[in-house]
Image: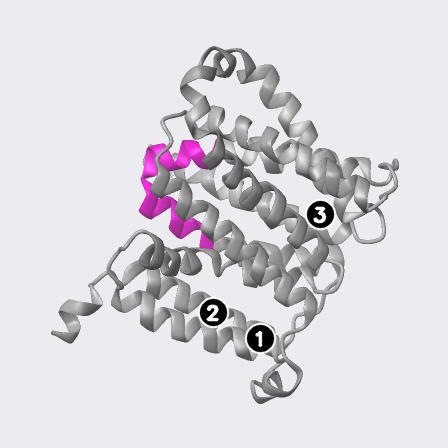
Amino acid sequence: MQSRHYLFPVIAVLIWAVNTIVSKLAVGVIDPAAISFYRWLLAGVLLACAFGRPVWRQRAAIRPYLGKLFVLGMLGMVMYQCLAYVAAQTTSATNMGILASMMPLMAVGLSVLLLGEAATVGAVAGGLVSLAGLAYLLSHGEPAALLAKGVALGDGMMLLACLSYAAYGVLLKRWKIPLTNWHSLLIQVWCAVPVLLVYYLLRSAPPVTLGGLPLVLFAGIPASIVAPFLWMHGLARLGPSRATTLMNLLPVFTVLIAIVFLGETVHGYDLIGGAVTLLGVIMAQTLKRPLRRTIA
């Protein structure tokens, strides 16, 4: 019975991997500002239809938390999505998937800084290993070149996007807002939509064409509603530790889909850098012994 519950988060991760491919397919078809706005507008309308009434009835209890919900909306729906769509203009889906695997490790680091959690052996050792893997990946197998050329723009944007989403997860844990996941998500989305509308208008982005419509529909429904539902179901049944480990499948799924559907070529530095990066993330998730006790 328990093995059945693994299917839900695995499908969620698969949907998010496909959504990374959608970000790449959107290049030249729909402006990043347009897909960001219309995606969350669609998701917001659907969520409002399902949960609008109970949220409205709780408006007095929700009001004190609006500031925090607004910050979460900016991090999770505005900054992460906009940066990821812009990053897709100049980096590969393969790189985006591998860089996204860094989010759990970033969350561990931010938890130490923002939540006062004790640093662990895995966090420190895994962080160093992942940084080495990223250096090898982003430099195309020549880490010394990073000192001369720096990180490519698209890769840097994706790293910032991942850092934003890691901060989103950490603050969500720290603030413990007394709302159900769906009610919280609904308010966050509607905090983000007006900001995304301003971004869309300032960019003077063209409207969605027939070619861009399927991309918006996938991003707005499976990636924004179906995948979170499946993920929350798996989280409730398996617990955070087991479910979070399944996020390590994200770069694997993304790379495989990018090869098959985008025709991307995977180089040796992608495999080596990606594997080392993922190894560091797994170390951070599994080696939980506090660092201070080890030093003492």
Identify which residue, 178 or 249, lies in the foreground: 178
Check disc 3: other Cα within 10 Å, few if <14, some if 14-19, many if 20+.
some
Tag 2 secondary structure:
helix
Provide the residue designation for mark 2: 277
Q: For the residue marked with disc 1, what is the amino acid?
A: Leu
Precedes in sequence: disc 1 or disc 3 = 3
Q: Residue 84: x, y in percent? A: 65, 53
Q: Residue 91: x, y in percent? A: 70, 65
Residue 69 placement, left or right of 88: left
What residue is rendered at 69% in x and 59% in y? 87
Check disc 1: other Cα within 10 Å, few if <14, some if 14-19, many if 20+.
many
Provide the residue designation for mark 1: 137
Q: For the residue marked with disc 2, what is the amino acid?
A: Thr
Precedes in sequence: disc 2 or disc 3 = 3
Residue 51 placement, left or right of 240: right
Tag 1 secondary structure:
helix
Is the N terminus in the top left, top right, bottom left or bottom right quadrant? top left
What residue is rendered at 88% in x and 37% in y? 209
Q: For the residue marked with disc 3, what is the amino acid?
A: Val
CB under 8 Å between discs 2 and 1: yes
Disc 2 and disc 3: Cα gap in Å?
Answer: 24 Å
Query: Is the stretch drawn in magenta largely helix, strand or loop?
Result: helix
Give the magenta range.
230-248
Disc 1 and disc 3: Cα gap in Å?
Answer: 22 Å
Check disc 2: other Cα within 10 Å, few if <14, some if 14-19, many if 20+.
many
| Residue 22 - label | 3
Residue 288 placement, left or right of 131: left
User: Is 11 covered by the magenta stretch?
Assistant: no
- Residue 257 in the image: above or below residue 239: below
Q: Residue 184: x, y in percent? A: 47, 28
